[in-house]
Amino acid sequence: MLGTSGPHFNLGTPSVGTPARIAARRLTFFSLCLSVSLAWAPLAADYYVYYPPSIKRWRICLMTFLGLGHAMIITLLIGAGLGTAMASTPAWKANYDGTPGSLLVTAYSSLGGFGSFCAVVNVFGVVANTAPGAYSMAMNFQMLGDFFAKIPRPVFTVLTTIIYTSCAMGGRDSLYEIFKNFLPLVGYWVVIWIVIVVEEDLVFNRGKGYDWSAWNKRKKLPVGIAAGVAFLVGWAGAVAGMVSILYLACVRRIMLTPA
């Protein structure tokens, strides 16, 4: 992709809009990027459980940062380059229909049929990227209780795949718009989850350690009232922020609409 589309990159393209609007767009883009990477935080608990307890914290932190950091940096830089090419190349702009798929196909267009094949491989790579999420969802189902734990994990994996595939097919005509609206919600949820875990570890537990043998013993586990209240308070703040943004957008539209 870099070899075929790199010559069309125009990294000197200036940002368009007032300084305030440019800053707002950059902040929005950063928050979306943050939401994508933070969404892996809950998954880390599902997979790092296989590491021995003796492993150093700094090693887990470092390999997580390097793994996610390199993947995100490469993807985002290529995406930014493709965006500049689309904005400055008339042929690219004509082929772009507002979906990531058309941008992929256009990036490989100089390769002809082989380029289309590469685009298909890319798309299948995105589909394969949903496998860790389906696996974690199956584990979450089994943690709901003894009844669910008795059901084989592949059953939940297949069920989860059917559900998100049906949702994708139902919203395929506006999938990109749904994605842009849903991704910030994922960011809200993950940030709330991280804050609860950090508060529990640093404020309430104060580094005393945990009795990992009690993970499946109901009488030794907390009810979760504090975590539940913290979760609702976090969502109340998120909703208040979304409502205020919607209110400001409505006021701005009213003020700009001619009488």
Image (tube, grey):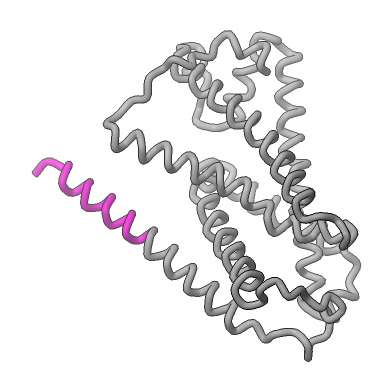
| Image coordinates for residue 61, horizontal then vertical, percent | 73, 50
Which span of residues is magenta-colored?
242-259
Q: List x then y, in percent, for residue 112.
A: 70, 10
Q: Answer above or below: position of 84 versus 248.
A: above
Q: The N terminus lies in which quarter of the figure?
A: top right
> For residue 218, which quarter of the picture?
bottom right
Q: Is residue 91 left or right of residue 19?
A: right
- Position of 132 with respect to 255 (left or right) is right
Horizontal relation, residue 54 to residue 234: left or right: right
Camera-side residue of 219 and 212 = 212
Residue at 71% over, 38% down: 126
Tell me if residue 94 can be seen.
no
Q: Is residue 3 magenta?
A: no
Give the prevailing secondary structure in the magenta stretch: helix
Residues 184 and 62: in front is 62
Question: Eyeballing the image, is 233 above or below 56?
Answer: below
Which of the pair 115/203 is nearer the observer? Answer: 203
The answer to whether residue 217 is left or right of residue 70 is: right
Residue 214 percent across, percent down from the top left:
83, 81
- Residue at horizontal 64%, vertical 52%? 39
Would you say residue 246 sits in the magenta stretch? yes
Please tell me which residue is depicted at 15% across the width and 46% down the height of the picture: 255
Residue 187: give x, y in percent of width and height: 55, 54
| Residue that sits furthest to the bottom in the current view | 219
Q: In the image, what residue occupies the spot 69% across and 43% down?
A: 65
